[in-house]
Amino acid sequence: MLEQIARNKRRSAIAVAGFVVVWAAVGAIVGALFAGNASSSGGGIVAGLVVAALVALVGAAFVYSSGARLVLAVAGAHPADGERFVQFHHVVEAMAISAGLPKPAVYVVDDPSPNAFATGVSPDRAAITATTGLLQILNREELEGVVSHEMSHIKNYDVRLILIMTTLIGFAAVIASVLWRSVFVVRLRGRNGAPILLMMLVTAALLTLVAVIVGPLIRFALSRSREELADMSGVELTRNPSGLLHALQKLEANDQPFVSFNHATAAMCIDDPLQHHDAWFHHLFDTHPPIGDRIAILQRVAATTPGS
């Protein structure tokens, strides 16, 4: 466990450094292409590199200060009322004590599709969110299994790693979107109009590549193995594989798409919401192993656990 925590912390640092390098490379390419003349191309590369690297660092700083709040806002999450969701609060508190962590903030998303996710940059600044659909179909034992899974993500620092990747990918996508719209809206005139327009097009294309291909591939590589690890870590917290096992079986039977998801937050969910959408392009971004494989592993664990 300690090794996994240390590995995730290293991966978080590497992920930030990698994105700074990628963004700096984008800036250097743009600077080289649009330097005024050959003699100033070196200065253009340096200027583009510095500007892009600063933007990436600002994005990383935003992740640490406001990334979790942004994820919760995008998902439509709101604080779980202590009276209406009293069992949810009690289970989160009990699992936090079992994990030796502070109680995370507790949030709810009003969505009939059963799902849950955790987010935050550290155990001291974490939140666990569940949909109303999940809270309606799970009994306490099953809810403990799901919350223990999410608590394991927090304890293992998975949430920091995925939050950094998610926010930086989204940052690239937002800037690319703004540039693409500007290309078709802004009318540049004068001698410098055409070069500026071309610069915007190239920058938008490069950032789109980062947001749509490079970033998701990195996140895909980081995400799949951690789900099975969180399942096993959650079982260690509850000493009861049956709770999570039965919860995953109910999630597998779910046929209601998670309305509040997007490709950025999908990697955080206990059940990949992309697998409940029919469109083929959604499955290009799958970040979870098949839920049936996870169930099979838990069934083997339950078969060797007394009283399960």
Image (tube, rainbow, N blue to C red):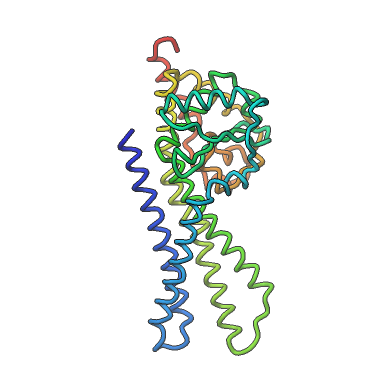
In this image, 231 relative to 177: left or right?
A: left
Q: Residue 28: horizontal and vertical position, in percent? A: 42, 73
Pick the front one: 96 or 160: 96
In this image, 114 relative to 150: left or right?
A: right
Which residue is rendered at x = 49% and y = 34% of the image? 290
Name the quarter where the N terminus is drawn: top left
As drawn, which residue projects farthest toward the top? 307
Q: Residue 74: horizontal and vertical position, in percent? A: 62, 47
As drawn, which residue projects farthest toward the left? 3
Pick the front one: 278 or 235: 235
Q: Residue 38: horizontal and vertical position, in percent? A: 41, 88
The image quarter containing residue 269 is top right
Which residue is rendered at x = 61% and y = 63% of the image? 177
Q: How many numbered marks appear? A: 0
Q: Residue 54: horizontal and vertical position, in percent? A: 45, 66
- Height in image: 123 above or below 237? below
Which residue is rendered at x = 46% and y = 56% of the image? 60
Pick the front one: 156 or 197: 156
Which residue is rendered at x = 45% and y = 51% of the image? 217
Name the quarter where the C terminus is drawn: top left
- Height in image: 16 above or below 296? below
In this image, 32 relative to 278: left or right?
A: left
